[in-house]
Structures are given as C-alpha cells and as structure tokens.
Image (cartoon, rainbow, N blue to C red):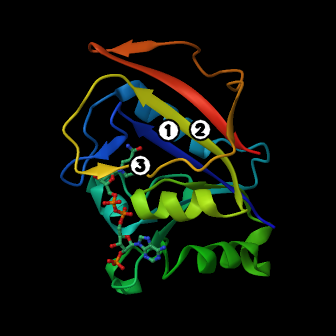
Amino acid sequence: MLRYSLIVAVCESFGIGFKGDLPWHIKSELKYFSSTTKRVCDPAKRNVAIMGRKTYFGIPASKRPLPERLNIVLSTTLTPEDLPADVLLCNNLEAAMQKMESKEYRDQIENVWIVGGSGVYAEAMDSPRCHRLYLTKVQGQFECDTFFPKIPQGFREVPLEGDTPQGVQEENGIKYEYKILEKQ
Ligand SMILES: NC(=O)c1ccc[n+]([C@@H]2O[C@H](COP(=O)([O-])OP(=O)(O)OC[C@H]3O[C@@H](n4cnc5c(N)ncnc54)[C@H](OP(=O)(O)O)[C@@H]3O)[C@@H](O)[C@H]2O)c1
C-alpha cells in the first residue's frame, strides 16, 4: 500500500490559513516546504503533492503548479480544463492514491505529500496510508479562518531529519520550530 506524509505549518491556535493565503510570511519555512516535498533518493523519480482546490488556487499563479512535483488537485466541481495539462484532477483522495498505485504512475513516483487544506488533512490522518506529519509550529497567534484538524491519538514525535534546523528558529521576529510526528 502506497503511503503518504502530511506537511503543514500551524500557529498556536492551530490556524493554517487566512483569506486563501498563509497567515504569515516566513521565507525559510517556505523553502523547507519546498525542499522537503521535492527531495527524492532516485533522481529518475519525483514526488507527488496532493491538495484541495482552495490550497492550489491559494498558491500565487506564478508559483503553481508546484515545480518538480506531480500536482494533484482534489475537487468535485473543477473540470480538467480549469487546470494546466500537467496537473491531475481527482474527485477524492483514495482515487488519487489508486491512480498513483496504477501501472502508469507507480514506477515514476517516490513520495506522496498531502499539502492541505483542512478536510484533506483530516481524511489523510485517519487513513492507514498515513505515515508522518511534518509539522512546523509557529509561535504566537495570527488571524486565521482555516484550521488544522485535531491530531488523532497515536502520533509520536520522532527525530528530525539530518539537515533540518533543530530548535526554535526565527525570521523577522516570528519564532517557529520544525517537528516530525509518526503514526504508530
Ligand atoms: N499553513 C499551511 O501549511 C497550509 C497548508 C495548506 C493550505 N493552507 C491554507 O489553507 C487554506 C485552504 O484550505 P481549505 O481547507 O480552506 O481548503 P482546501 O482543502 O484546500 O480546498 C477545499 C476544496 O477542495 C476540494 N476537496 C477537499 N477535499 C476533497 C476531497 N477529499 N475530495 C474531493 N475534493 C476535495 C473541494 O473542492 P470542490 O468544492 O471544488 O469540490 C473543497 O471545497 C488557504 O488559506 C491556504 O493558504 C495552509
């Protein structure tokens, strides 16, 4: 069974979004998101980023689709013509995963990343396909209208990967810390 990991940045109230965008601007955290979701061991393969419709269109037009990753957008209202030809449209998460397990894709992809938003994260954490949650904890309160769902029981913190900065980081007065939780 093909598994996936989630990646998200949350503030103290577990807010993740405001008016279709991120509630904060932390360049180094965006770089971490980008390098983590792009990283492959086999250079002949690439990773997949699965996201809801609002998350996809919340990415600035000049930065989407997310480069060097196969982008999959979940939606029940879009049609393929609403998206660039190299972006896949699926009408549910399991359909997306089954597509990635199919003969057409399975040998081309390495890791699957769930990159939001709320409902997609909730469904993803409940599934046996869920491996890890890469969580950036942003200190402080930000105005948010979208929130990360409650993390189910059974997620345990594991050591950060080699190149990940340890401890509290700071950029423009915003403090944040990288964590990795693994589903037991
Ligand atoms: N802090 C972070 O790390 C982070 C990460 C991601 C997003 N965000 C923020 O979160 C906000 C967007 O998240 P959101 O929760 O509002 O929306 P979202 O999950 O990105 O998009 C919701 C839409 O996606 C489609 N969808 C979601 N789950 C689906 C499923 N299982 N099957 C089929 N379609 C599905 C539906 O589209 P249809 O209505 O077309 O069916 C739904 O209306 C933005 O502000 C964004 O910046 C933050």
Quote the CA–CA distance across marks 1 and 2: 5 Å
The residue under label 2 is which amino acid type? Answer: Thr
Q: Which mark, residue 36? A: 2
**Residue 150, image x, y percentages:** 48, 49
**Do the CB atoms of the residues marked 1 and 2 lie less than 8 Å apart?**
yes
Quote the CA–CA distance across marks 1 and 3: 17 Å
The yes-or-no answer for disc 1 within 8 Å of ligand 1 is: yes
**Residue 12, image x, y percentages:** 35, 30
Q: Residues within 10 Å of mark 3 (few under 14, many from 20)?
A: many
**Do the CB atoms of the residues marked 1 and 3 lie less than 8 Å apart?**
no
Quote the CA–CA distance across marks 3 and 2: 20 Å
Q: Which mark, residue 92? A: none
**Do the CB atoms of the residues marked 3 and 2 lie less than 8 Å apart?**
no
**Can you say whether 74 is above or below 13 in the image?**
below
Q: Which mark, residue 33? A: 1
Side of 117 relative to 167 (left or right): left
The yes-or-no answer for disc 3 within 8 Å of ligand 1 is: yes
Identify the residue at image location x=67%, y=78%: 99
Q: Residues within 10 Å of mark 1 (few under 14, many from 20)?
A: some
